[in-house]
């Protein structure tokens, strides 16, 4: 079997589709179209993230809601189900062990901070280079007073 992944249309209303083609069939067979969970992560489709389960009866791919988790979608048309229960972070990849008894999941966490800078009336009259020079001089004066107090 071979798995083909793609989207219908583009943008916010895009719908992912999975197509499974049986390569063992003696005659050409039409691909079986599978509708994945609507939360399927785009990177699951385009970076090779959707994979067959070890028994070949399901597809496993990443879904993103509040956190990324793995979803198992049976090929027989029965409802899929979540197979991990992470509450945070992203999944960047997963692989089955050679004996097919263990699933390794690579996860990542992204942290970012925002700093808000405000100009005072004194600062707004100066250009950025002047303000930077002024700030550096003030810092040096403070360090000098601190060193002199020792």
Image (spheres, rainbow, N blue to C red):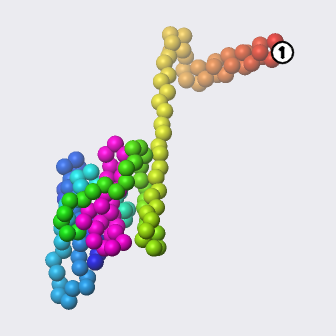
**Residue at image point 46% right, 52% down:** 107
Quarter containing the C terminus: top right
Q: Position of residue 61 (x, y in %)?
A: 33, 60
Between 106 and 99, the residue placed more toward the observer is 99
Q: Does 123 appear above or below 80?
A: above
Whether residue 83 can be seen here: yes
Q: Does 68 appear above or below 145?
A: below
* Residue farthest toward the front in the current orientation of the protein: 101
**Residue at image point 72% right, 15% down:** 142
Question: Is residue 145 found inside the magenta-colored segment of the image?
Answer: no
- Counting every numbered tag in the picture gives 1
Q: Which residues are magenta?
A: 50-74
**Residue at image point 43% right, 63% down:** 103
Q: Position of residue 37 (x, y in %)?
A: 24, 55
Residue for badge 1: 150
Between 103 and 113, the residue placed more toward the observer is 103
Between 72 and 133, the residue placed more toward the observer is 72
Q: Residues within 10 Å of mark 1 (few under 14, many from 20)?
A: few
């Amino acid at each position: 079997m071979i798995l083909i992944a793609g989207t219908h249309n583009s943008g916010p209303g895009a719908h992912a589709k999975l197509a499974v083609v049986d390569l063992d069939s003696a005659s050409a067979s039409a691909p079986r179209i599978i509708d994945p969970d609507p939360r399927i992560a785009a990177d699951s489709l385009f970076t090779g993230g959707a994979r067959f389960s070890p028994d070949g009866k399901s597809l496993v791919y990443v879904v993103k809601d509040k956190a990324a988790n793995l979803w198992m979608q049976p090929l027989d048309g029965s409802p899929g189900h979540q197979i991990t229960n992470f509450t945070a972070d992203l999944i960047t990849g997963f692989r089955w062990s050679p004996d097919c008894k263990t699933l390794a999941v690579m996860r990542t966490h992204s942290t970012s901070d925002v700093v808000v800078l405000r100009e005072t009336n004194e600062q707004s009259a100066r250009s950025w280079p002047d303000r930077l020079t002024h700030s550096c001089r003030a810092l040096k004066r403070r360090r000098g007073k601190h060193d002199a107090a020792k």
